[in-house]
Image: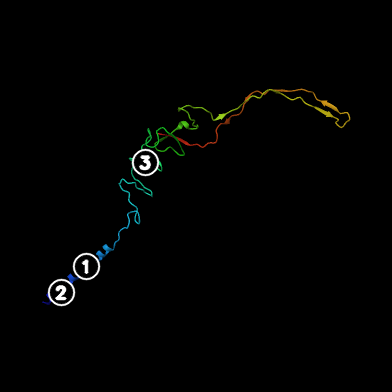
Amino acid sequence: MLNKILNKEFSVLSILISVLILGTITGFGIHLIFAWTGPTTNPPDSNISALLNTGSAEQTKSGTLNIGGQMKATGGFCIGTDCITEWPSGSTGDIPSGMIAMFDTSCPTGWTRFAALDGKFAMGASSYGATGGTSTHIHSVNPPATDTATPGCDWHGADDPNPNQFCGNIHTHSVDISAFDSGSGSSLPPYVSVVFCKKD
């Protein structure tokens, strides 16, 4: 009989403790819910920056935007104030095929070394292919024929009251140097070599 009474009292006590614990947890949770205060303004004011989305409104990203795949623009593409809506006619997407450019290293992918300009300077013209010029030059010299000057006269006995003038044998020499060419000299101005490459 005593065991039944003790078991009954223990069961009632267990229920009361369970109710007390459950009530405490519920009350604490309700307190947390009412204590939380949401943002007072819309992003980005006083909050994190607004996220990029698929909306039609203009959006700004102040930091670096890294893109792992392709970037496509249907309405145009701008860098600063320079905007385009399509690539130039005949281009391969960025640089026209056949364009020749200078590099300080080997030709990059999509370019082929343009050996026709090795050891040469480029000169503008209406069409490609004409050649000319040389890396050295000479000067032709043809001095004119001339005669030597007539010798003058000297006065002897200048301190004598009766000085005498002495003149040597008056004569000339004809000089005619044959034409000749100078040695060969370089025609090149100071230069720095570069690698010419042609766009495939």
Residue at horizontal 47%, vertical 32%? 117
Identify residue for label 2: 9
Q: Residues within 10 Å of mark 3 (few under 14, many from 20)?
A: few
* Badge 1 or badge 3: first in the primary sequence: 1
Foreground disc of the pair 2, 3 = 3
Q: Is residue 12 above or below residue 86?
A: below
Residue at horizontal 83%, vertical 29%? 155
Q: Which mark is residue 77?
A: 3
Q: Amino acid at mark 1?
A: Gly
| Helix, strand or loop at mark 3 | strand
In front: 107, or 70? Answer: 70
| Helix, strand or loop at mark 1 | helix
Residue 14: image location, x then y, percent = 18, 71
Residue 180: image location, x then y, percent = 63, 25
* Badge 1 or badge 2: first in the primary sequence: 2
Q: Are marks 1 and 3 in contact (CB under 8 Å)?
A: no
Q: Which mark is residue 23?
A: 1
